[in-house]
Image (cartoon, rainbow, N blue to C red):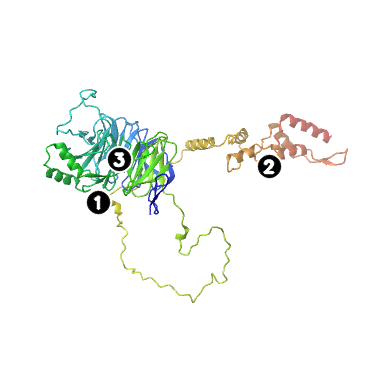
Amino acid sequence: MIRANLWGIWLDPYQGEFPETIEEYLHHGSMKCISFNRTGTLLAAGCSNGSCVIWDFETRGLAREFRDKDCTAPITSVSWSKYGHRLLASATDKSLTLWDVSTGDKIARITLQQTPLHACLHPGSPTPSICLACPLSSAPLLVDLNTGSTTVLPVSVSENGNPPAPNPRNKFADGTPPFTPTAATFDKHGDLIYVGNSKGEILIIDSKSIEVHAVIFIPGGTVVKDIVFSRDGQYLLTNSNDRVIRVYKNLLPVKGSGEEIGNISNNNNDYERHYDKLKAIGASCLVLSCELSDAITKIQWKAPCFSGNGEWIVGASANKGEHRLQIWDQAGRLVKILEGPKEALIDLAWHPVEPTIATVSVAGLAYIWAKEHVENWSAFAPDFVELEENEEYVEREDEFDLNGYEEQAEEVVIDENADIDVETCKKNAMFSDVEDSVDEIVFLPAVPSPDDPDEQLDKCLGSSSKLEDSNHSGSPSSMDAAQIGQVIPPASSPMEVDNSTAEDPADGTNSKRKRRLSAKGLELQQAEKGKKPTKNKANGKSTNSNGKQMEFANGNSSAVDDEATEDDEVNIDNQCF
């Protein structure tokens, strides 16, 4: 039975596989964008200084860092190749850089005429050199990274079948008209390209012939900001300016979609207008599944995407200073709202396998959202019983005695001559399309970097500055002790050190530091060590001539100075004579 609460969130008795809380965060410079590899073992991030880093997501350790001396501009997007051998980074300086992940070498770098907001590698090749780039103010481009050649993709189709007439005004320097930022993406195998334009249309284009095969009209007719495929290629979502995320079911076969849409196009010749034919073909390619929106706040969405298995859709609020995620199921029901820190969200990625989401805030931190695990101790043994309170256990007299008459368990027959295969890995059902002959990069050997003493000191100082004002870890008394070479016993907190060093030295053994005697006092102490005690004729009692001085030395008094030492010497001489 499924019920809804007051907030409109549907309550399922079976808990969904989606994240619930922030588990930790990653920090390296100021990150701007992130992307998981195909198996989710590596997380790539682009930084504001033009560098790219790769995190080992299993250990949360930094595995690689790519730096190009020619690029210091912020990275706008990062994209993995199919098997993780290459990484593509686009930057605000209009550049596209292709990296070799295993060696860290730069394979290619080209500069476009416009700033690419998003770029992705062709998903059909293990080592692709073709990428799809979506510039800021021009139509999407197919870019050959080896030769630097570009192919402009069509973004609209006129109703009479002729190419749309360009606007003669407000042209760029190269004569091309201005465009609203356009979204585009490959399908699962890269046979087709889906382009969302400013008229609220989805164009299906052949990636080889650059021919428009179909047009799908989006309700509302507003600008398409994002267009994303699920990892299995079965679903497509669009994020439009009307604050609605729309999910479509892909009716074309995942593999061989280019041939299938070509056959559909050849069989539809009964239309007078070419535009009507494209719309009819589009109805055979995509069908609207559900629409997702916030009916109360009517907020804009940012970086929507599917979960790894395609069962959930997540969208982030585009409001400033708000780090909020909303998760829906495929039926369009809102199932979870996640509230993060008061930092605007700029990018997110869902883990391909686990119920984990990585988000990037405007502060440059990557937050890891995961399920809140509850310990179940009863899983260790069937007869294990959880106790609410501690109970005293009374041992039986014969509980640990050896029982020779106990029935022996039946021995398991093991064939010692059987061959055991330790080389073949069992395939994951989610990655059944992986070719056996391809060597995929799953993990990278992490090179440990030695700690820099100066850096560690800065971290310590930074940590101590976050304490309260009453915690003076660098008090003058501790500085004096450090100057005279005395060691302060370790303390569990800065307050412990402060309290010990701030005590009055006259307390004797309670003080954890000692003051150094003056030069005159040290000379007197050494001279008086050799003298023997003498009797005082006035009172007949034995008097130690250096008793006064030793009292000062052993008591660790801070009042010993040159003048006090000279007065003690005169008093001792008077007592002796």
210, 525: nearer the viewer? 210
Image-quadrant location for residue 493: top right
Q: Which mark is residue 435?
A: 1
463 over 421 or under it: above or below: above
Q: Quadrant of the C terminus?
A: top right
**In screen coordinates, is 195 left or right of 371?**
left
Identify the residue under disc 2. Answer: 510
Specify the farthest residue to the bottom.
405
> In front of the other: label 1 or label 2?
1
Q: Which mark is residue 236?
A: none
Dot 3 lies on which element? strand
> In front of the other: label 2 or label 3?
3
35, 328: nearer the viewer? 328
In x, y percent, where is residue 147? Answer: 21, 35
Q: State how far apart marks 2 and 3 are (Cα).
A: 63 Å
Query: In the rendered structure, which disc, 3 or 1, sits on the residue that comes first in sequence?
Result: 3
Question: Quick check: marks 1 and 2 in contact, CB under 8 Å?
Answer: no
Q: State how far apart marks 3 and 1 are (Cα).
A: 20 Å
Identify the residue under disc 3. Answer: 79
Amino acid residing under circle 2: Asn
Query: In the rendered structure, which disc, 2 or 3, sits on the residue that comes first in sequence?
Result: 3
279, 192: nearer the viewer? 279
Q: What residue appears at the point 24 percent right and 51 percent down from the top-left corner?
A: 435
In x, y percent, where is residue 353? Answer: 34, 50
Q: Is residue 3 shown to the viewer in this render?
A: yes
**In screen coordinates, is 126 left or right of 535?**
left
Question: Quick check: marks 2 and 3 in contact, CB under 8 Å?
Answer: no
